[in-house]
Image (cartoon, helix red, strand yellow):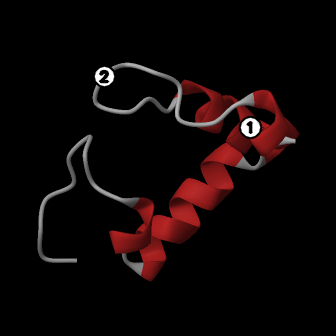
Amino acid sequence: MTNSITPSTYVRSLGYGLMRQLADFIDPQEGWKKLAADITDSSGVKRYNQMQIR
């Protein structure tokens, strides 16, 4: 990926290597659920609710 990564970078925009590193980082003990629960939109409202994260 030639662009720098910022807080507004979409995961789908990451290259394979970075995507793999991210997956390895958040996989233990379902860490992706904790990450998804912390994602907010521009107004600060949670992007995903508990039903969506299940």
Cα distance in 3D space between marks 2 and 1: 21 Å
Give the camera-side residue of 13 and 4.
13
- The residue identified by callout 1 is 33
Do callouts 2 and 1 mark residues in contact (Cβ within 8 Å)? no
Name the residue beneath numbered marker 2. 43
Quarter of the rendering containing residue 37: top right
Residue 53 at what x, y percent from top left? Answer: 77, 41
In this view of the protein, can residue 14 be seen by the observer?
no
Other-residue count near label 1 (Cα within 10 Å), few / some / many at <14 / 14–19 / ≥20: some
Which circle's residue, 2 or 1, is located before the other in the chain? 1
- Picture residue at 30% right of the left edge, 22% below the top: 43
Question: SS class of the residue under badge 2?
Answer: loop
- Which residue is painted at 50% across and 68% down in the image? 19
Q: Reply above or below: 12 against 23.
A: below
27 left or right, relative to 7: right
Is 12 located above or below residue 24 in the figure? below
Answer yes or no: is residue 29 visible: yes
Is residue 45 positioned above or below 35 on the image?
above
For discs 2 and 1, the disc positioned in front in the rendered view: 2
Left or right: 23 in relation to 7: right
Identity of the residue drawn at 35% across and 59% down: 10
Q: Residue 18 occupies which quadrant of the picture?
A: bottom left
**Looking at the picture, how far across and down is residue 40, in whole percent?**
44, 29
Residue 2: x %, y % from top left = 13, 76
Instruction: Tell me if mark 2 has few (under 14), some (14-19) or many (20+) residues whose alpha carbon lies within 10 angstroms of its own.
Output: few
Which amino acid, mark 2? Ser
Placement of the C terminus among the 4 image quadrants? top right
Secondary structure beneath dot 1 equals helix
Q: Amino acid at mark 1?
A: Lys
For the N terminus, the image quarter is bottom left
Q: In the picture provided, is 50 more to the left or to the right than 19? A: right
Q: Nearer the viewer, residue 25 or 38?
A: 38
